[in-house]
């Protein structure tokens, strides 16, 4: 059996604050396999983003274990084992689209030819070829998020961590980007961990849906999706899709009831 790409066992995280300890995560146990698309859903403040930050080595658990590609999260961060896409695109306004995507490649010391080749490839992946010389303020919100995804893909990490990247976009743009993200995932085979507040988005995108309780964040359900990997938007009308969405909704409701 192949070892999981991301593995959490009995993971706890408590923040010490001036008002006393804040228990952010409690007894989180989860394995994410190579090529999985895993969505995390739960109420605001339940620890979804905190867990993603733990995977990224940006927060350190206070109990339990967590491994990423067989390493500690900090070692995986230093090995650049993942790309991270934030809620806001976070593009530098004084850099062109090409310049923003080149930035991590410049930091990592890639050759000029390699930088050009990688920028070209990821812009094609996110369907932004031809926009290289545009500045972020010349792009729509959806295009900026696609550029942010391109930047995260540029150094070809096996894992893509995505913290509610489409939450601020309108429904039509969000649907389009969901379709594009599924196509990108199919082409690249990346392992994706994705935070969302949308039940529909979680069910549409994922091979596995992780339902979390209010703080301290616990996993109340892990749903393995039987849906095919190729998913047109109208699959959301399929009875299986509706059943999965109902199970997610029930998991969220029970999580609140147990709080």
Image (cartoon, grey):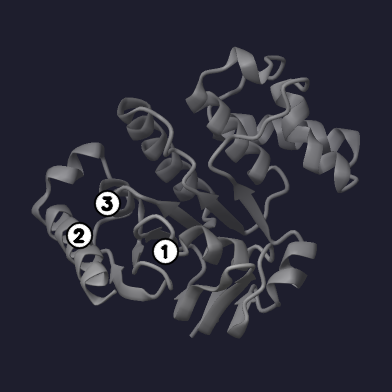
- Tell me which corner region of the image, top left, top right, bottom left or bottom right, holds residue 210: bottom left
* Image position, residue 19 (x, y; %): 58, 68
Q: Which residue is mark 2?
A: 249
- Residue ID at (38%, 39%): 178
As drawn, the residue found furthest toward the left would be: 239
Circles 3 and 1, Cβ within 8 Å, touching? The answer is: no
Circles 2 and 1, Cβ within 8 Å, touching? The answer is: no
- Tell me which corner region of the image, top left, top right, bottom left or bottom right, holds residue 258: bottom left
- Residue ID at (45%, 54%): 195
Question: Which numbered disc covers residue 199?
Answer: 3
The numbered mark, 2 or 1, whose residue comes first in the sequence reads 1
Question: Is residue 233 found left or right of 132 in the rendered image?
Answer: left
* Image position, residue 78 (x, y; %): 80, 64
Task: Indicate the secondary structure of the residue bearing disc 2.
Answer: helix
Task: Indicate the secondary structure of the residue bearing disc 3.
Answer: helix
From where the camera sits, is residue 237 visible? yes
Q: Which residue is mark 1?
A: 46
Give how far apart the Cα atoms at labels 3 and 1 are.
15 Å
Q: Residues within 10 Å of mark 1 (few under 14, many from 20)?
A: many
Q: From the viewer's side, name the closer residue of 26 and 112.
A: 26
């Amino acid at each position: 059996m192949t070892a999981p790409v991301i593995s959490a066992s009995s993971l706890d995280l408590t923040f010490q604050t001036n008002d006393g300890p804040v228990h952010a995560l409690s007894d989180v146990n989860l394995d994410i396999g190579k090529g999985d698309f895993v969505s995390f859903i739960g109420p605001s403040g339940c620890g979804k983003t905190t867990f993603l930050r733990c995977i990224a080595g940006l927060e350190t658990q206070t109990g339990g274990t967590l491994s990423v590609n067989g390493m500690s999260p900090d070692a995986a961060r230093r090995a650049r084992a993942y790309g991270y896409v934030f809620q806001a695109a976070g593009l530098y306004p004084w850099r062109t689209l090409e310049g923003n995507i080149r930035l991590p490649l410049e930091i990592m010391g890639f050759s000029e030819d390699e930088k050009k080749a990688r920028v070209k490839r990821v812009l094609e992946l996110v369907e932004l070829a031809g926009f290289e010389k545009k500045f972020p303020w010349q792009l729509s919100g959806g295009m900026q998020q696609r550029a942010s995804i391109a930047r995260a893909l540029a150094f070809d990490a096996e894992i893509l961590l995505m913290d509610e990247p489409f939450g601020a976009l309108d429904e039509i743009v969000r649907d389009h980007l969901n379709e594009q993200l599924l196509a990108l995932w199919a082409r690249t085979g990346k392992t994706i961990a994705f935070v969302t507040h949308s039940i529909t988005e979680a069910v549409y995108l994922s091979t596995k849906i992780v339902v979390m309780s209010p703080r301290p964040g616990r996993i109340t359900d892990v749903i393995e999706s039987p849906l095919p990997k190729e998913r047109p938007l109208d699959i959301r009308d399929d009875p299986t899709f509706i059943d999965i969405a109902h199970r997610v909704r029930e998991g969220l409701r029970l999580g609140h009831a147990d709080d």
